[in-house]
Amino acid sequence: MVHVSQHPLVKHKLTLLRHKATEPKKFRELIREVAILLAYEATADLSLNELEVTTPMGTARGYSLKEKIGLVPILRAGLGMVDGIWEMMPGSEVWHIGLYRDEETLRPVFYYNKLPTAPTVQLCLVLDPMLATGGSAVAAVDMLKKWGARHIKFVGILAAPEGIARLTEAHPDVPIYVAAVDERLNEIGYIVPGLGDAGDRQFGTG
Ligand code: PRP
Ligand code: URA
């Protein structure tokens, strides 16, 4: 399932993100804000416990989240998506996966993994702004599944059709939430028209 946000705020903010004149400070703010809006959509089906809450005026029916959530940013660019979502879901755990894409082969290379020894949550949200060839997302989901995660969703910002096809084929049970699906990848694996290099634009490198 691919969910492309139709929310006007997402469309507005994505346009600012794409703009080549948007500088790193603003770019980081926008990544954070779009991530919150997409996570809101990706968590619309979370299950709840019913409870009773005492208000200053009486009692009311209330709810608490049933599932514990793991936020799994793919370093580096996924880091910028964590803080805002974490503020909305402060009970979440954050597990970092370090992956970079080899510039020649475009294949993902692992360099860091901070997963606990066994899964402690019911739902994992994999966070990475860019789903290009899909190699990094597939590798991260492979790793999470091997480790024992059952319920996984991918939350990105921009996807190429190639990345959607690859992730869907490898992991049809992992829904994909993005702000937009662009036209294509160029000859060096960048999303066109895209927004450029999401890691470099956040961290002021490159
Ligand atoms: C980018 C992006 C994804 C990956 C997407 O990371 O954040 O992780 O590329 O490409 P793919 O779908 O073809 O695998 P990059 O390798 O540039 O590393 P960085 O986040 O450290 O800059
Ligand atoms: N990674 C990025 O940061 N941008 C792209 O367009 C593709 C991969």
Image (spheres, helix red, strand yellow):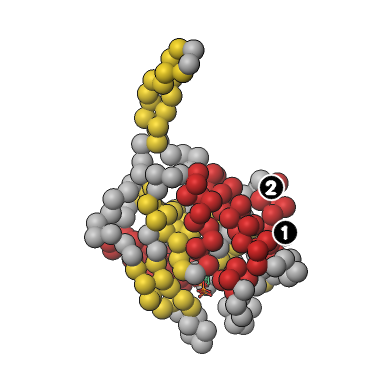
Q: Residue at x 58, y 55 (%)?
A: 32
Residue 130, how many percent across, how many down?
56, 66
In the drawing, what numbered circle is on residue 15? 1
Front in this rendered view, residue 82 or 168: 82
Mark 1: secondary structure: helix
Amino acid type, residue under disc 2 in the picture: Leu
- Separation of residues labelled 2 and 1 (CA atoms): 10 Å
**Can I make out residue 37 in this image?**
yes
Residue closest to the far left: 117
Residue 193, how many percent across, how many down?
69, 70
Mark 2: secondary structure: helix
Residue 63, how many percent across, how many down?
42, 28
Q: Is residue 95 left or right of residue 175?
A: left
Q: Callout 1: 10 Å neighbours few (<14), some, many (20+)?
A: few
Q: Image quadrant of residue 126?
A: bottom left
Amino acid type, residue under disc 1 in the picture: Thr
Q: Residue at x 50, y 40 (%)?
A: 44
Q: Which residue is mark 2?
A: 9
Q: Residue at x 39, y 64 (%)?
A: 96
Residue 199, how many percent across, how many down?
56, 71
Q: Callout 2: 10 Å neighbours few (<14), some, many (20+)?
A: few
Q: Specify the quadrant that holds the C terminus.
A: bottom right
Residue closest to the far bottom: 104
Asked if 67 appears above or below 14 in the picture, the reply is above
Q: Image quadrant of residue 143?
A: bottom left
Front in this rendered view, residue 20 or 147: 20
Q: Earlier in the sequence, mark 2 or mark 1?
A: 2
Q: Are marks 2 and 1 in contact (CB under 8 Å)?
A: no
Asked if 190 appears above or below 125 in the picture, the reply is below
Q: Residue at x 63, y 71 (%)?
A: 201
